[in-house]
Amino acid sequence: MVRDPQTRSQEAESRPVPRRQPRRFWSHAVLFAACVLLVNGLFGERGLMDTIRARRAFTAAARDLDRLKRENGTLRDQARRLRDDPATIESVARGELGLMRPGEILVTIKDVK
C-alpha cells in the first residue's frame, strides 16, 4: 500500500508534537547548578578569592619573618660585641654615658647667636 506525499504530510500534522519542556527544565537546572558551583568556587569558603587572600597573607608573613630573622641576627651580634669587644664597650660608654679616659680634655662648643 503506497501512500501519496500529501497523505503523509497530513498524518505528520495530525500527530502531537513531542513536548520539550522536561528537557528545557533539566538544562536550566544543570545550568543553574553549574553557576552556583562556580560562584561558590570563586567566593565561598575556601574558594578562589579566599585562597588568593591566604597566599598574600602567607607571603607577607614570610617577608616579615625574614626581616625579623635578619634583625634578630643583627641584635645578637651587637649583644655579643657589647659583652666581648672592648672597643664597642668604650664606644657606647663615650657616646651614651659621656665618659672619658684619664687625661682627655672635653671641649664643648656652643652656637653663638
Image: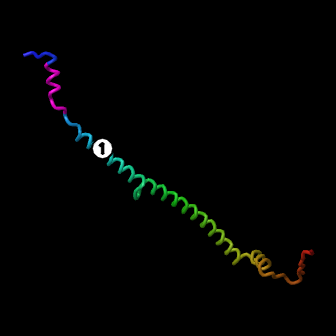
Q: 17 or 38, which lies in front? A: 17
Q: Residue at x 90, y 81 (%)?
A: 105
For image coordinates 76% across by 77% down, the residue present is: 92
Vertically, is 26 above or below 48?
above
Q: Neighbour class for label 1 at 10 Å: few (<14), some, many (≥20)? A: few
8, above or below 26, in the image: above
The reply, left or right, for residue 99 in relation to residue 55 is right
* Image-based side of 62 in relation to 9, left or right: right
Name the image quarter holding the C terminus. Answer: bottom right
Give residue 85's position: percent from left, percent from top: 73, 75
Q: Position of residue 100 (x, y in %)?
A: 84, 81
Any magenta on residue 100? no
Three-letter amino acid code of the residue under disc 1:
His
Q: Main secondary structure of the magenta part?
A: helix
Instruction: Give residue 83's quadrant in the image.
Output: bottom right
57 to the left or right of 69? left
Q: Nearer the viewer, residue 107 or 75?
A: 107
Q: Which residues are magenta?
A: 7-17
